[in-house]
Amino acid sequence: MKIELIVNGVRRVIDVEPNELLINVIREKLGLTGTKYGCGIGECGACTVIVDSKPVLSCLTLAVEVAGREITTIEGVAKNGRLDPVQEAFVEEGAVQCGYCTPGFIIMAKALLEENKNPSRQEIIEYIKGNLCRCTGYINIVKAIQKASEKITLKERKTT
Amino acid sequence: MSFYAIGKRTARKDSVAKVTGWEKYASDIYLPNMLHARVLKSPFPHAIVKKIDTSRAEEMGAIVVTFKDVPDKLFCPRLVSTPDATYKDWKVLTDKPKFVGEPIAAVAAETEELAQIALESINVEYELLEPVFDALESMKEGKPRIHDKIMLNDKIIDIENNVACRLELQEGDLEEAFKRSDIIIEREFRTSRGYHNQLEPKVAVVNPEPDGGLTIWCTTQTIHNTRLLISEIFNIPVSKINVKKLALGGGFGSSIQTNIVVPIAVALALKARRPVRLAYTKEEDMHEHSSYQMIFRLKIGVTRDGKLTGGFMENIMDIGAHQIQAYPLLGTCAGWWVSLYKLQAIKYVGVAIYTNKIPSCAYRGYGNPQVTWAVETIMDELAEMLGMDPIEFRLKNYVGERDLFWGQGPTVKSIIKSCGVEEILKKGSELIGWKNRPKPGEQKGRFRRGIGMARGYHTSSAGAPIPSQVIDYSGAILKVNEDGTVDYITGLVDQGGGTLEAHAKIIAEELGLPLKNVNIVAADSQTTIYDVCTHASRGVYAGGGAALNVARQVKEKIFKLASTILNAYPHTLRIRPDEERGQAVIYVEGLPGKEITLGELATLARIKNLGTIAAVDSFRPPACPPHFTGYFVEVLVDTETGIVKPLKVVIGADVGTVINPDLAEGQLHGGFIMGWSRAILEDLKYNEEIGDIECRGFIIDYKMPTAADIPEEIKTFFVETYEPTGPFGAKGLGEGAQNPAIAAISNAIYNATGVRFYELPITPEKLLEKLKEKEGRKLAVEDAVKLT
């Protein structure tokens, strides 16, 4: 069956099976391999994407469930060739090691900062505790999200 | 020493690709006309395949391979040891599965779903054999034989009592040493089995080439050993196999060996004559590798004035159903033990035992975290018995500068030339508030705080002045481009820690290049020279040594060429980075104007037909210098729930010159959390009834730490030392970053509760049980049960 998805701002019409998972559509039909398969059962968060402003585990979501909706994958976070403040902060804070969990964390951080511009350390931890990382010990990831929040606040102050 | 590239905080070169989703891992490789593969695995821990019927799968159009279609050849998936120390007991697919999850057959079809349907149509008749799951049971007379005959190098050897291999060592007069001792302590320790839980499950994509060769994209820590092994198994000339280097989604030792998905995908691709992708699920991945369970018996003597005398160590290792590197591990465990503290006499008995479990392989530290946990527990106990401060006691006995260090078992040794142990312990104890720590076991009440410490180290590479049973060298190619940048081409895989970033800084430092002018370029086994593997914390030390070696040669060539153009003697030339021009500038000191940028030089060399400035060379690390770490941990124990939380963590490290300060800190952070997990949480428990791991591979039932488990405060520091054999004074870090963690946590729990643990992990259940034994009080749960 054909469904329509708005992926990173672009309208895409895709032929999918009714039982096809969103992660497979994103990775294999759209070729957006930045979204990672980690566990396939919603435990690691590596496959997280944003569906209309909410973070969603693409390995537990059927593609047909999100027909007609707006999907942001990691490839859609940087705009016009410029890194998003969250991405900048991950680079600057050494929050990236092997990088396999990174897209999922960045998507979660984006979603969090959309909901809450100035989250406390505890709020950050609560929000991202469903995402697993084996390399960094999470310390610099939390720091990076704190820094991203500061960057966004600073940017807004400058523009107002 | 002052550096301009080394030690600077810079964004790692691959980070933009990683934060934007551009980075390519093996799992991201999809080829045109590709088939998808699935693997049929034994549901039984010990069985013989009597019959296998694949006709229905073949009727569906699937490509099928079983044990009948793969070379009937034993191999060892890990090629780091020399052939004379390599035990071979693996086959690509087997008709005698020895653990739940052992591959028997595989299929490839147009989609993964079709492959799965075809797989499920295969009919297998098994004859069940009695399994054995416990190492101590398995080695008894009359137990089921897991292996009959295996190979050591090219000789067939018989396996008796499921003893895979053994190693015994003896030095000095132990009887005499124990006689001189005022205290002799003896303890038994039992570690858990852990799962690496690297985020990227194992994957292989294989493309058959028209000349009979293969191109392979796979999860690996070594592209060169992968091609050597595939060549060995399938009898394809090594030069026709090309293994691509990609980003790796974490390794921690689980891809030192060639993952079994690689030869399986090769077998399918050779049969199908089409590209094949085989990607394991997480559940399958968890059945692919685990750490070793070790049972130590440790006996150590000490005199009243706090001098250790001698020691005995027995190490019984449960290695699971196959050998990956059991024999070298028996050696390293001995080495980790004798290189912690000075013992005048030692005796070591190491035995590796087969069981019907998932095969064990190296897991960050290669036995060192386990050994350090046992030794550092005993050191704590002895200090208390002697009435000495545990830190003072350690300083009195530690192996340090000018002592002999066993970097990778008894055949890899070198003299320690840099050591920051004293400074680590001094500064660490100040930062944690060591002097004010509670007296062990004196606290009452529900919540109790405790401070514990432990120290440790790990080798940096398996280098040594003489050849050993471990292969260790790296190679590099460096060439100068006409734009003044250099291309760095290496077969060394970055597991994620940023090893190649360190190499870039080493090259920039040596060549006076702005860091951005060092390109880390795509590489594969065809276009690089040999690198053994990214393991043994050798990436920065040995791999960085190889990078420096070619950078020096390139520098010499630059000066030689520039000397003719600048009309100056080559040995009077200097090179410096000019950030404004974005170039390295070659100049004559004191003569302004006598200079040329590296880009201009390379361009001139091209126009005048003088050639490309380049170097290619191998580098053998001359030593195996230990990098040292010290852990200081404050915990909070809830004596009603048994839950332990980390409050404050201080980690000090001596890694020689720090090349990437932020990435080095990251290693310590990650090391702590992984160590925390091994101390408190993780255990790949077996359920003997199902013959499988209790969690069945579901990560939901295999808890690892999340962001909610991080300590409130974590402080890391590096002490200043300079390793004379390392690139710009650097040593390794990846494994030492974690090694003492378990011991420090365990000692902190003792400090809080007065209870010692000799079995890992220290789960809430075990903690409550021990507290109940010690304090004779009922558990909160029992009260709760009574109330209901």
Image (cartoon, coloured by chain):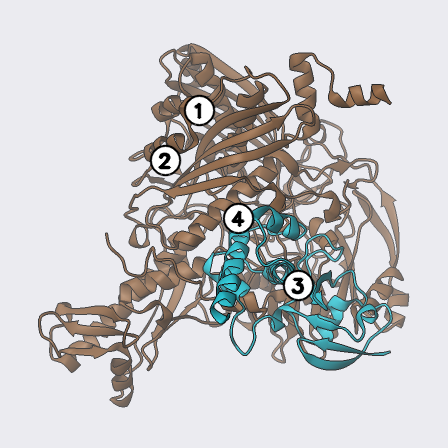
Chain colours: A cyan, B brown
Cα separation, mark 2 vs mark 1, equals 27 Å
Q: Are marks 3 and 1 in contact (CB under 8 Å)?
A: no
Type of amino acid under label 3: Lys
Q: Position of residue B17 (x, y in %)?
A: 53, 69
Helix, strand or loop at mark 2? helix
The residue carrying mark 1 is B346
| Quarter of the view holding residue B297 | top right
Cα separation, mark 2 vs mark 3, equals 39 Å
4 and 3 marks on the same chain: yes
Question: Are there few (<14), some (14-19), or many (20+) residues within 10 Å of tag 4?
Answer: many
Type of amino acid under label 1: Ile
Which residue lies at the image location 46% right of the left edge and 23% below the top edge? Answer: B437
Which mark is drawn over residue A36? 3
The residue carrying mark 2 is B424
Q: Are marks 4 and 3 in contact (CB under 8 Å)?
A: no
Cα separation, mark 3 vs mark 1, equals 49 Å
Which residue lies at the image location 80% right of the left edge and 22% below the top edge? Answer: B784
Helix, strand or loop at mark 3? loop
The residue carrying mark 4 is A139
| Quarter of the view holding residue B639 | top right
| Quarter of the view holding residue A55 | bottom right
Q: Which is more N-terminal, label 3 or label 4?
A: 3
Q: Chain of mark 1?
A: B
Type of amino acid under label 2: Ile
How many marks can you see? Answer: 4
Nearer to us in this view, B469 or B404: B404
Cα separation, mark 4 vs mark 3, equals 22 Å
Q: Chain of mark 2?
A: B
